[in-house]
Image (spheres, rainbow, N blue to C red):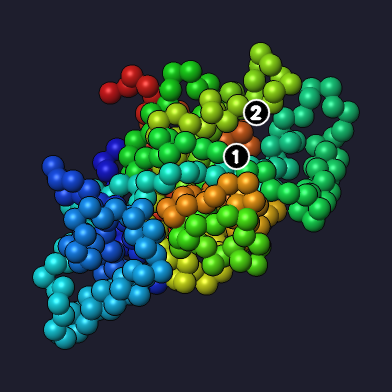
Amino acid sequence: MKPAAPSASFSGPFALGTLSAPDQASFPGLVVPEGRVLDLRTALCDPALTTRRLFERWDEVLPRLGALAADEADAHSDAPTDTADAWRPLDGLRVHAPVEPRQVFQSGANYRQHVIDLEVAHRAPDDPRTPEAARAEIAEIMDRRAAEDLPYVFIGLPSAITGPYDDVVLPSWAEQPDWELELAVVVGRPAYRVSVSEALAHVAGYTIANDLTDRATVFRRDMKAIGTDWLRSKNAPGFTPLGPWIVPAASIADPGDLRVTLKLNGETMQDESTKDMLFGIARLVSYASQTSRLLPGDLVLTGSPAGNGMHWGRLLRDGDVMDGSITGLGSQRTRAVAQGAS
């Protein structure tokens, strides 16, 4: 597969990314819709700056980022600016995962239709219910859960993260590798024991994550009483393509109504609104913060909608190409490569 050309397609006047020129170190970049990039190490006079460090200074730097993007817009209208010569074309740069988080919080079973589909697909062979009856019963349980229960959140590994255009290696032991496109929340302010009403004030922005999962190892076969094994099923190197961009929260009018779409080899498999989430972003962030201290640059993955491979009876194979997009956040393209394949 020819690497996808990065595109500056996103909502708002700017986004953030991590990029590199050939044979050079990566840098935190300010990206504007015209397809130009500013190296923020130079613009903010911090040679050691990373995207994560930007979020550690988020309240301080956010107005400055807006001013820099406005300067670039002025440059295109022939007004003089201080940074006009520092911007470079996006074309020719490699796009990496936009941030290196210290912690990754993942939400499971958070899309109503997705959970219904999985439960119906995993019914026991001797289940006396028809698929329609099972679906109706599970739907009632999901509605009750959204009203009365708590989110289900677990921990992922930062080492599973890879770039939005990188190949994903399918380990030889992964018998049922599956896709799970998700809206990812990027933390901007430390959050510990914040209320639901306070939670969104701690969100810096949003990006795209594909939380790949090996369905065959989700549940322990040797110790069924233990239940799920998220380490094994979700955390192989590269199992979380991330990005391409982090779009500031202020540029996304309603994160609770974004279209999440994944195509496999050009065929649409997932296409659902974040409105189908059982627990919204504020509830997820608040819930995770009741136990853990969320740090700037951390990720909160919000769960995946219906349309995974288990639903379609078609799991990932060597050579498959996944195109994932979310409204206002751009798009990513990754190819699945079997371990050992050239």
Residue 265 marker = none
Of the pair 40 and 305, the residue shown nearer to us:
40
Residue in view at x 66 percent, y 62 percent? 196
Secondary structure under badge 2? loop
Q: Amino acid at mark 1?
A: Phe
- Marks 1 and 2, how far apart in space? 10 Å
Q: How many marks?
A: 2
Q: Amino acid at mark 2?
A: Thr
Query: Which part of the image, by quadrant, shows the N terminus?
Result: top left
Q: From the viewer's perspective, is 148 left or right of 319?
A: right
Residue 154 marker = 1
Query: Which part of the image, by quadrant, shows the C terminus?
Result: top left
Q: From the viewer's perspective, is 306 left or right of 269?
A: right
Q: Crowding at label 2, few (<14), some or many (≥20) Cα neighbours within 10 Å?
A: some
Pinpoint residue 192: horizontal percent, then vertical percent: 58, 55
Residue in view at x 65 percent, y 28 percent? 228
| Image vertical order of residue 217 relative to residue 89, above or below | above
Pinpoint residue 276: horizontal percent, then vertical percent: 66, 56
Q: From the viewer's perspective, is 159 left or right of 228?
A: left
Residue in view at x 26 percent, y 74 percent? 68
Q: From the viewer's perspective, is 74 left or right of 339?
A: left
Residue in view at x 79 percent, y 22 percent? 125
Pinpoint residue 198: horizontal percent, then vertical percent: 61, 66
Q: Are marks 1 and 2 in contact (CB under 8 Å)?
A: yes
Q: Is residue 32 visible?
A: yes
- In the picture as drawn, the residue positioned furthest to the right comes out as 128
Pinpoint residue 151: horizontal percent, then vertical percent: 69, 48
Residue 228 marker = 2
Of the pair 48 and 310, the residue shown nearer to us:
48
Secondary structure under badge 1? strand
Q: Crowding at label 1, few (<14), some or many (≥20) Cα neighbours within 10 Å?
A: some
Q: Which quadrant would residue 76 be assigned to in this image?
A: bottom left
